Image: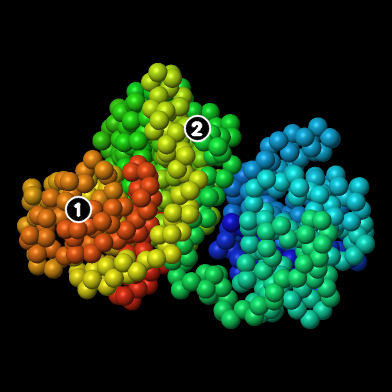
Amino acid sequence: MCGLVGYVGWRDAAEVLLAGLRRLEYRGYDSAGVALADEESEIGLRVLKKAGNIDDGLEKLLKNGSSNGSHLGIGHTRWATHGEPNDRNAHPHTDCPDELALVHNGIIENHQSLRKWLSGLGHEFTSDVDTEVICHLMEHYLQDEGDLSQALARSCEHLEGAYAVAVVQSPLGANEREIVAARKDSLLVVGLGDDENFLASDVPAILPYTRRVMYLENGDFVRLTADDVTVFRSDGRRVDRPVTEVQWDPVQAQRDGYPHFMLKEIEEQPAAWESALRGRLSGGEVDLQGLQFPALEDIEHIYFVACGTSYHAGMAAAPLWERLLQIPASAEIGSEFRYRQPLLGEDTLVVFISQSGETADTLASLDLAIEENCPTICVTNVVGSSMARRADNVIYTQAGPEISVASTKTYTTQLLILFLLACHLGRQLPHGQQHSETCDRLLAAMPSLSDLERQLLNDTTEIGSAAERIADWEDSFFIGRGLDYVSALEGQLKLKEISYIHAEAYPAGELKHGTMALIEEGVPVVAISTQPQLRDKMASNVEEVRARGAWVVAVTDQPEGEVARRSDAVIPVPDSEPELSPLFVGTALQVLAYRAAVLRDCPIDKPRNLAKSVTVE
Ligand code: AGP
C-alpha cells in the first residue's frame, strides 16, 4: 500500500506533490520520489528519488534547487513489497532515462515472466521492483502507438495483479502536458480543480486543493490535463464517473473516515488476506516464487520465535506444522528463548515472526540461531527490515502498513502465511507420509476466507453487546482448549492493551487447578469453542464457571451447539476448517476489545505505555 500523487495545473508541481506525499506517508514510508516535467530546459523530465522518509530524503533533494518550477508531475511514497527500500528501487521508475516516468501502487504478480520477456527484447532493467516492467512495456508500445494513453492501455493487457499506475512523458517528446493513469484493484481518485487537476491513491493528498473527487473503477483509464479529465476503457470507449464532494477533514481521510486506525485495519483484513495470498495460491497449488527451504529430512525440530501477538501466531502454527511436517514443533517467547540455552544446530529450523521485523528480543534470537547455523525463515510485514535481511528466507505478509499499536491485520495475515507454508512444506514429504487430505482441504478453503471474514465484519451486533457487558468490569477471563486456548491468549492481550481491563487467558481444563477461585458472581468469561473434538469438554467447562456465577459469552462456529446453549450470550464466527479458526476468532476478539475500549473512552491507536515496535530488550 503506497502513496501516489499526480498534478497538472498552474501551481508549483513539486510543492503540491511533496505536500500530498506527506499526507499519504502513513501508507508507506521507506522511500519517496517525484518526476517533474521540466518545460524550461533541455532536460525534459527530472526524476528525484531517495530512500528514507520524506523529511530525510526527498525534501532535501528538492530543497537543493532540484525543483524547477514545473507545473506537471507525479510522486510516490513507497511501502516495499518487492525489492529492498533503497534509492534504486524507489519510485518513479523510468524506461530509457528521461523519456517517461511512472509510479505504481499494488503488486504485479507476473513481473518475473514479463521481465524475462522484455529483457529478451533488449530492455535493460535498473531496479529489483516489479513496477519497472510497466515502464518497459510502455516504452515498447509508445513506439507503436505514439500516444501515451493507448500505450498504457496496451501495456496493462499484460499485467496480472493489482495496480494504480500513473505515467508522465518528457515535454520534449510529448504531444500534450498530460498525466495518464490506470486502475485495477488498487484505489485511485481524481481531484477536480479550476485549471488544474489532481490524481492520488487516497483522498488526503487532494483535500487541501479540492473536495470534488472522482473515484475510478477497476479497468478505468484516465487522462488528465490542466483543463480536462477523460475517463475511458481499454477499448477507448469514454465513460463518466460521478463526482462526489468529500466531507472529511485530512486526518479523518487518512483513516478513510474511520474513527481510529485500529478499526480501519480490522476492516481491511479481508483485503489483506487476499493480498497475502495474491500470486501465492492458485487452483490449490502454492507458488512461493522460488523460495528455497531446507530439506525436511535434515530437520529434527522446529521453533517459532516471536513476541506478543506474533508469538500467538507461532503458537497457532506449531501444531499444524508438527502434524503436516511430522517434525516436533513448538513456539518460544522471543525474550526468553536465548536465555534458556536451547539446543540449536543445522537440524533445527527456526521461524521468526515479526510484524515490524525489528523487535529486539526476536532479532537477538535470530542472531543466536544464525550463530548456531540453524536454517531460518522470517515472516514479516516490512520489506527490508532487519530480520528480513538476516534470515535465510523471508515471506512478506503483504498486509500494508499497520499504524495502530494493536496488531490486527498483521496477526491474521501471519496466521494465513504460516498455514499456507505448513501445507506447502507438508507436500514436500514422501508421498506415503503426506497428510495430503489435510493440505488439500485447507488450501481449498483459503480462497473463500476473505468473504467469510466480510460476513463476520458485516454483523458485529452480538460482539457489541458482549463488549457492553465486559466494559463494565475490571476483570475478565478467556478460556479455550487447543487452538482455542491460543485464540484466548490473543483475545486477552487485545482487550488488555487497548481497554486497560485486566484479562487472563486460561486453558479451560486448567481452571479447576486454582484459577476457579477467582470466578465470582457476574465476572465475564469468554469461552471459545471451535474445535470439534473438544466441544463436549468445553460445554462442561462452561457449566463449571456458570455454576459459580460467571457471565459467559461463547465464541463459536456452532451458535446452536451445546456450548452456546449453556452460555449467557453467543458470538458466532464462520463455520470453516477448525485449523483455520484463529483467523475468525482473532477478528471477533479484536472487535470485542475495540468496542470495549471505545465504551471506556480509551485512546485506542496509541495505548499508554506501549509502542508499535519494541526495539529495546
Ligand atoms: C500486539 O497487539 C502488540 N502490537 C505487540 O504484542 C506486538 O505483537 C509485539 O510487540 C511484537 O511485535 P512484532 O510483531 O513487530 O515483532
Q: Residue at x 70, y 74 (%)?
A: 242
Q: Is residue 4 visible?
A: yes
Q: Residue at x 79, y 76 (%)?
A: 196
227 displayed left or right of 512: right
Residue identified by numbered label 1: 562
For the residues bearing labels 1 and 2, Cβ distance under 8 angstroms: no
447 displayed left or right of 209: left
In the rendered image, the vertical position of residue 360 relative to residue 301, given as above or below: below
Q: Residue at x 13, y 50 (%)?
A: 540
Residue identified by numbered label 2: 392
Q: Position of residue 72 (x, y in %)?
A: 81, 67
Mark 1 Cα-neighbour bin, 10 Å: few <14, some 14–19, many ≥20: some
- Secondary structure beneath label 2: loop
In the rendered image, the vertical position of residue 75 relative to residue 158, given as above or below: below
The amino acid sitting under disc 1 is Glu
294 displayed left or right of 190: left
Q: Is mark 1 within 8 Å of ligand 1?
A: no
Mark 2 Cα-neighbour bin, 10 Å: few <14, some 14–19, many ≥20: some
Q: Position of residue 529 (x, y in %)?
A: 25, 50
Q: What colouring style does the render use?
A: rainbow
Residues under labels 1 and 2: Cα distance? 47 Å
Q: Is residue 73 visible?
A: no
The amino acid sitting under disc 2 is Asp
Q: Earlier in the sequence, mark 1 or mark 2?
A: 2
Q: Of 145 and 283, which appears nearest the observer?
A: 283
Tag of residue 43: none
Q: Position of residue 1 (x, y in %)?
A: 59, 56
